Image (cartoon, rainbow, N blue to C red):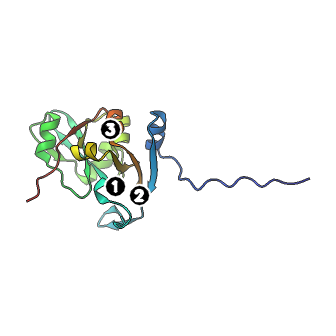
């Protein structure tokens, strides 16, 4: 009798909730994993700029306004959010960033793991993508865990989360 060895499991990463949501919506993506380091009291991604363009990696920032409550801004990590523009886009007079200590309570994600896909799925907060995402086509967003991301079509994700493209960037001086 010949014993057959079990097939080796593919070295694919386990699927995060965000990846499962994308699968269900039939939106293709590429799993990505980044090393991280602690900076102060938060985790930061280690990005090798020789292998990946930082401008296609997007951060998910959460602010809150009196009219809407929490609102989500998604923009390149190498840019700054203009809170006045996010307030105007979301129909608020003014929005303020959600304090770090209230982030998990507000979104269910810790700093560095916030994702427009997971936040929409769980909480239905309004999501606004900076126009550069639409212009770039493919962007990289967090998949809900620190160091884990997905490369995905910006239009498809925006449609999935009922988002809107708008200008969110602070003007450089």
Residue 144 visible from this viewpoint: no
Secondary structure of residue under mark 2: loop
62 vs 146, left or right, is left
Q: Nearer the viewer, residue 112 or 135?
A: 135
Q: Are marks 2 and 1 in contact (CB under 8 Å)?
A: yes
User: Closer to the observer: label 1 or label 3?
Assistant: 3
For residue 155, the mark is 3
Q: How many marks?
A: 3
Q: Residue at x 12, y 38 (%)?
A: 88
Q: Residues within 10 Å of mark 2 (few under 14, many from 20)?
A: some
In this view, 23 is above or below 15: above
87 vs 115, left or right, is left
Q: Residue at x 31, y 53 (%)?
A: 56
Q: Which residue is identified by label 2?
A: 147
Q: CA distance from mark 2 to mark 3?
A: 23 Å
Location of the C terminus by quadrant is bottom left
Q: Residues within 10 Å of mark 1 (few under 14, many from 20)?
A: many
Q: Nearer the viewer, residue 137 or 116?
A: 137
């Amino acid at each position: 009798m010949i014993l057959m060895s079990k097939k080796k499991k593919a070295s694919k990463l386990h699927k995060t909730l965000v990846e499962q949501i994308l699968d269900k919506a039939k939106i293709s993506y590429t799993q990505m994993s980044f090393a991280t380091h602690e900076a102060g009291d938060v985790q930061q991604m280690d990005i090798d700029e020789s292998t990946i363009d930082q401008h296609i990696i997007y951060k998910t920032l959460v602010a809150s306004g009196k009219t809407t409550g929490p609102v989500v801004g998604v923009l390149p990590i190498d840019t700054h959010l203009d809170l006045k523009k996010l307030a105007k886009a979301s129909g608020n007079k003014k929005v303020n960033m959600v304090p770090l200590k209230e982030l998990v309570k507000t979104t269910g994600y810790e700093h560095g793991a916030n994702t427009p896909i997971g936040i929409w799925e769980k909480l239905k907060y309004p999501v606004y993508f900076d126009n550069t995402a639409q212009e770039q086509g493919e962007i990289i967003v967090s998949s809900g865990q620190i160091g884990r991301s997905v490369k995905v079509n910006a239009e498809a994700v925006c449609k999935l989360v009922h988002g809107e493209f708008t200008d969110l960037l602070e003007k450089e001086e």
